Amino acid sequence: MSLFSLDEVKALSEQSGPGNAAAPAKDLFAEKQRAGWHKPDVGEARCDLSVERMTLTPHASIPVLSIWKKSIKGRKLTDIKADDAMVTYFADHLTPVIKKVLGNYLSNGHWAIVPSPKRRHLTQNFACRIAAEIGNRLQIPYYEDVALSHTRQRVAVDFDLGYLPEEPNLIIFDDFVTTGSTLNAMYRLLEPLGKNLFFVVGINNNL
């Protein structure tokens, strides 16, 4: 089952978080964005990572927490994934959000963090590297191959169980969410096994 109801996490996200900041943070990527703005590539999603907004979005009734959303201007998502510096950047911004939302649940529970399964990038996987860094900062275990995928397909997917963590509470992490198909497959895999699931992504590409 999900650790929180949709209303409970929405209430938490409204109480605190980067979405309630009075002014956006300094744009750290302005120089890299300018060239892309002159010739926008409408075929690929972008994100302005300097504008944070904690958002709770239901994907097939599963509440998914994100702190960025796609935008007209900004860096292409493929460029973000290819930039090693973004691993630290995502961890820097996501870790305090997770701490705020989970609060005493995190300190009193038995937690681990689990990324979505590797598909296109089997080594140096972006989501896996971020999840590992967040786990290190939260001082909770990180498990990489909990879910296994035998296809690169991203819609109507099902995963096989690779390893079942002993921790009852799992943070399920993905770098981006678009349709929510991957996270729903994680839910179908782990919820029947008695795990409490909290879904977190960096960029919501479906807003």
Image (cartoon, grey):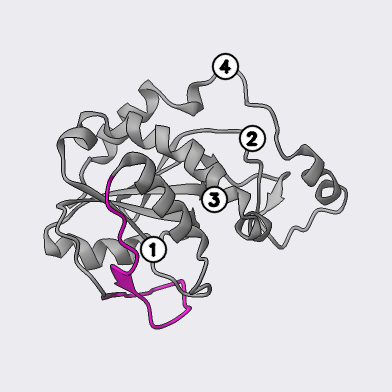
The residue stretch that appears in magenta:
140-160
97 and 38: which is toward the camera: 97
Q: Which residue is mark 2?
A: 50
Disc 4 is placed on an element classified as loop
> Label 2 vs label 1: CA separation?
25 Å
Please report the residue visible at 69 percent of the width from the left and 60 percent of the height from the top. 44
Q: Is residue 111 above or below residue 189?
A: above
Q: Check if mark 1's residue and mark 4's residue have beta carbons within 8 Å.
A: no
Q: Amino acid at mark 3?
A: Val
Residue count near mark 4 (Cα–Cα under 10 Å), binned few <14, some 14–19, many ≥20? few
The residue that mark 3 highlights is: 87
Toward which corner of the image does residue 147 lie, by quadrant?
bottom left
- In front: label 1 or label 3: 3
**Residue 36 coordinates in the image, percent (x, y):** 81, 51
Q: What residue sits right under mark 4 in the picture?
A: 22
Query: Mark 3 to mark 4: distance in Å?
Result: 26 Å
Please name the residue shown 40% across and 46% down the image.
134
Callout 2–callout 1 Cβ contact below 8 Å? no
Instruction: List x then y, in percent, for residue 166.
Output: 14, 59
What's the residue type where badge 4 is placed? Ala
- Of helix, strand and loop, which mostly describes the magenta segment? loop
Residue that label 1 marks: 116
- Farthest residue to the top: give it: 22
Q: Earlier in the sequence, mark 3 or mark 2?
A: 2
Whether residue 64 is visible = no
Task: Say which of marks 1 and 4 sits in front.
Answer: 1
Q: Nearer the viewer, mark 2 or mark 4?
A: 2
Q: Is residue 205 visible?
A: yes
